Image (cartoon, grey):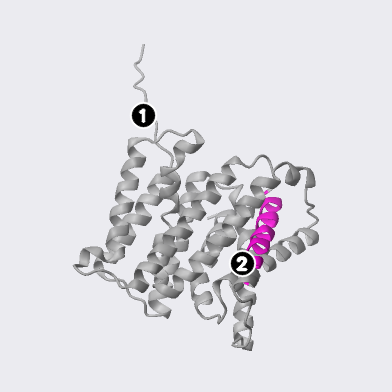
Amino acid sequence: MNAFKLRFLGAMSIFGTIGIFVRAIPLSPAAIACFRGAVGCLFLLTFMAVTGKKLCWADIKRNLLLLLLSGAAIGVNWILLFEAYKYTTIAIATVCYYMAPVLLVLASPLVGERLAPRRLACIAVALLGLTCVSGVLKGSLPSGSELMGLALGIGAAVLYASVMLLNKKIGQIAPYDKTVVQLGAAAMVVLPYLLLTGGCDLSAMTGGAWMLLLIVGIVHTGIAYTLYFGALQKLSAQTAAVFSYIDPVAAVLLSALLLKESLDLLSIIGAILVLGSALYSELPERKPRKNLKKT
């Protein structure tokens, strides 16, 4: 396995552990999201300065509106995902969040892409999996808290899919330039919401909690995004799609091992259906081989 694959795997593994850390930080999801965006942005700017990379302001200016919109979507997406962790298990919130690739397929006609039968099948399988995860098939309705967690997770997935769509529209720009602006925009958009909803109560923050918050900002955002974008350009789309599912698998396994959040058999089947269909929808279609006759 080459160095770029290892970097990408490292990034996805780091992303998969964020729910464990967020759960242990006694701050509102908006406060954590704002801090994450600000620290991640500052870390990337520092990394670029140390490595001699410079922001290309011409590229940023040309794509500024889309960068700000996608950054705003990232910030609200983080809030919804972190809120989902409060209402349901990390495993179920993560599975709902990874409906995003399927939702992106559903929205593909908006960007002029054909909705092929193969992809429609992926959507149907993912919806069946989501039904299994929701607990509706168990014969009793989920609690209000569980339904709220599912709704927040799916809401985060919708915003994640919108970020993917917006990124498709963004023109030529270096990955680090794009990420710096998006993370900065995420922090700036979340900050007014944070102030309007009561600000940031730091009274419950201990030394350990501050350390966890710094890890989320530096490791889960700054370092993880540096590894992610540093490797992404060197990997094929198919390899990146397959490796990206280390994130939800790690989240599900760690929530079971560390937080004792076990999944029943039906939820496990649902998770496999959702993640499997989402992964399959991202893989390129194989073109039929033409039979070549010898002459």
Q: Residue at left 64%, top 82%? A: 210
In this orientation, which residue lies closer to the viewer: 119 or 185?
185
Q: Is residue 21 above or below residue 167?
A: below
In the picture as drawn, the residue positioned furthest to the left comes out as 139
SS class of the residue under badge 2?
helix
Image quadrant in which you'd find residue 79? bottom right
Specify the amino acid type for callout 1: Pro
Q: Is residue 31 visible?
A: yes
Dominant SS of magenta comes to: helix
Q: Please report the bounds of the magenta region as a residue range.
A: 175-194
Q: Residue at left 66%, top 64%? A: 187
Q: Which residue is mark 2?
A: 193
Image quadrant in which you'd find residue 89? bottom left
Magenta-span inclusion, residue 251 = no
- Image quarter of the C terminus: top left
Is residue 256 rendered to the left or right of residue 68? Answer: left
Q: Is residue 94 above or below residue 280?
A: below
Q: Residue at left 40%, top 63%? A: 151
Mark 1 residue crowding within 10 angstroms, few (<14) / some (14–19) / many (20+)? few
SS class of the residue under badge 1?
loop
Q: Residue 10 in the image: state x and y as whole percent.
A: 55, 63
Question: Alpha carbon of mark 2 to alpha carbon of mark 1: how far?
Answer: 51 Å
Specify the amino acid type for callout 2: Tyr
Q: Nearer the viewer, mark 2 or mark 1?
A: 2
Q: Which residue is mark 1?
A: 288
